[in-house]
């Protein structure tokens, strides 16, 4: 599974990247390599820096053109924006108060049991 697929929460074979033009498919592979080695800061992934791209290029023996570096950086920005949006949506959903129906006896019982357990701590 690719790093993008993991971040997007989907299977890599469900993503439409086979539709990429042949001329840029290598960039997708390079981006996945770089993204797989991405550092994090405790709140998510860090952007891929020029230094990391340069080191990857040197170590892999792939000489990048300025245009390819620009494409990798823009892909990284889009990737981080997508993962941030997914994370923010998940956080919003988790922080929204849960509502239960008053006639749902099992849920009401579980609610009060949870409140009792909290108060006993």
Image: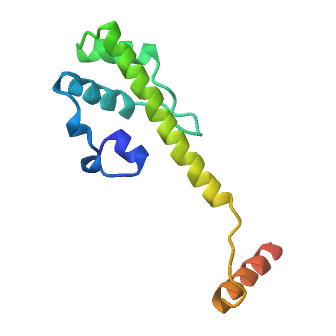
| Nearer-the-camera pick, 48 or 23 | 23
Using the rendered view, name the quadrant where residue 109 is placed. Answer: bottom right
Q: Position of residue 26 (x, y in %)?
A: 22, 25
- For the view shown, which residue lies furthest in the right direction? 119
- How many marks overall? 0
**Which residue shows up at 51% across the image and 47% down it?**
86
**Which residue shows up at 22% across the image and 28% down it?**
25
- For the view shown, which residue lies furthest in the left direction? 22
**Side of 6 where 20 appears, left or right:** left
| Nearer-the-camera pick, 62 or 17 | 17
Q: Position of residue 62 (x, y in %)?
A: 23, 14
Q: How is the image coloured?
A: rainbow
Vertical placement of residue 45 versus 64, above or below: below
**Side of 25 where 94 appears, left or right:** right
Q: Position of residue 115 (x, y in %)?
A: 77, 77
**Which residue shows up at 71% across the image and 66% down it?**
97
Vertical placement of residue 88 versus 77, above or below: below
Using the rendered view, name the quadrant where residue 63 is placed. Answer: top left
Of the 4 image quadrants, the one containing the C terminus is bottom right
**Side of 43 where 76 appears, left or right:** left
**Which residue shows up at 31% across the image and 29% down it?**
33
Using the rendered view, name the quadrant where residue 29 is placed. Answer: top left
């Amino acid at each position: 599974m690719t790093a993008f697929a993991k971040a997007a929460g989907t299977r890599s074979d469900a993503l439409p990247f086979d539709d990429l033009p042949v001329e840029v498919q290598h960039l997708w592979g390079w981006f996945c390599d770089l993204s797989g080695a991405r550092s994090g800061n405790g709140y998510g992934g860090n952007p891929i820096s020029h230094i990391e791209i340069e080191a990857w290029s040197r170590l892999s023996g792939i000489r990048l053109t300025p245009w390819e570096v620009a494409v990798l950086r823009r892909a990284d920005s889009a990737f981080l924006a997508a993962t941030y949006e997914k994370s923010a949506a998940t956080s919003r959903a988790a922080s929204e108060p849960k509502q239960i129906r008053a006639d749902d006896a099992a849920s009401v019982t579980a609610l009060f049991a949870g409140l009792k357990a909290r108060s006993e701590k």
